[in-house]
Amino acid sequence: MHSLSDYNFQIPSRLIAQSPILDRSASRLLHLDGKHLIDRQFIDITNLLNSGDLLVLNDTQVLKARFFGVKETGGKIQVLVERLIDERTAYVQVRSSKPPSVGSRIFLAEAFEIIVNERSGEFYMVTFPSDIFYLMDMHGNLPLPPYIEHSANTFDEIRYQTIYARHAGAVAAPTAGLHFDHHLMERLQKKGIDFAYLTLHVGAGTFQPVRAENLKNHRMHSEWYTIPESTVDMIHVAKARGKKVIAVGTTSLRALESASQSGILQAGSAETSLFIIPGYFFKTVDCLITNFHLPQSTLLMLVSAFSGYERIFSAYEHAIKQNYRFFSYGDAMFLDRNL
């Protein structure tokens, strides 16, 4: 299953969730239990875990990283901050009728100008006039995914963040974590479920399409992560006790597996461009909580590697027939690793 066409499927547009449901943990949960598909509610996750099991969550916080503005020529433009280089310099994505030229200025949010320094592949390196975090907070917009058709509102600003977000740096939410609310986390803690945290700042590249038919020719976008020593220690303890390590979201899984390439999970910070496709040997993660992913996306390939290509596509077919809600604001899956 190493061809792009193997990962295509058709989804009715009505199943693409355009807004979050009111209660985070009231979403649905499709459980892949061996060869069986079980329809559950997300709150039922407490029944799928045992005392001593460990949930690993990504505590990145989504930035208000999208700006609207005009070029020097007067043409409209959108700028999405992809990654900060320093407090005034960043790589950005640009959407406009014509690409901006190096050395040109872009007027954003009717408030300030940025200067285009150079182009690097699909991104531009630009200079902001002052601290980028401040300018994003004052003038930026929450960057909802491209398949969500409305502009971000105040409800989105709450619901497109996890309740445990603490380290600002992402331009997309780790969406599996959006299903957890305080009540559910308290229930899990009372049952003896442990929580550990890491940070992976999700980049705009997560929405970039795979263009190579042969997946071995695809180059994954790079993202920064950090895994604290305390999280590594908790994982080692859980493993030693025969307990499960459950990654909450593909971002948590990618960080853990990236830090396990030597065969032993290592604490620390690094860039990862790990591209997981069927045939990959998982080293740390036992189970995965994840949303439903786009056709032909790297995330669909990842979950196919984790639980098996045929099982995943059977699950997606079932989810479509049962009217599950798809993508960032949609429902979730609980996956066991395919052994």
Image (spheres, rainbow, N blue to C red):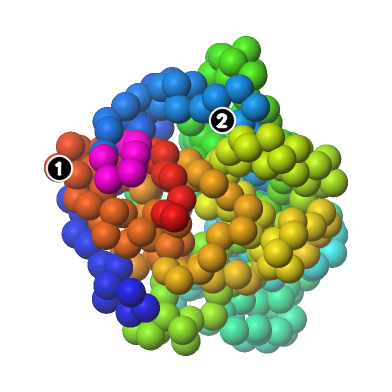
Quadrant into which the C terminus falls: bottom left
Q: Is residue 94 left or right of residue 216?
A: right
Which corner quadrant holds the N terminus?
A: bottom left
The amino acid beneath tag 2 is: Ile
**Residue 182 makes an appearance in the image:** no
Above or below — where is 141 with respect to 243?
below
- Crowding at dot 2, Cα within 10 Å, few <14 / some 14-19 / many 20+, comes out as few
Name the N-terminal-most of marks 2 and 1.
2
Going by the image, does 276 lie left or right of 126? left
Counting from the top left corner in percent of width and height, residue 80 is at 59, 61
Name the spot of residue 286 as percent of width and height, x first. 54, 46
Q: Which of the two residues, 148 or 253, is positioned nearer the viewer here?
A: 253
Label 2 or label 1, whichever lies nearer to me, is: 1
The part of the chain drawn in magenta is 30-36
Q: CA distance from mark 2 to mark 1?
A: 30 Å
Name the residue that disc number 2 marks.
158
Instruction: Give the residue number, with chain letter if any, for mark 1.
Output: 321
Q: Is residue 107 above or below residue 189?
A: below
For badge 1, the amino acid type reads Lys
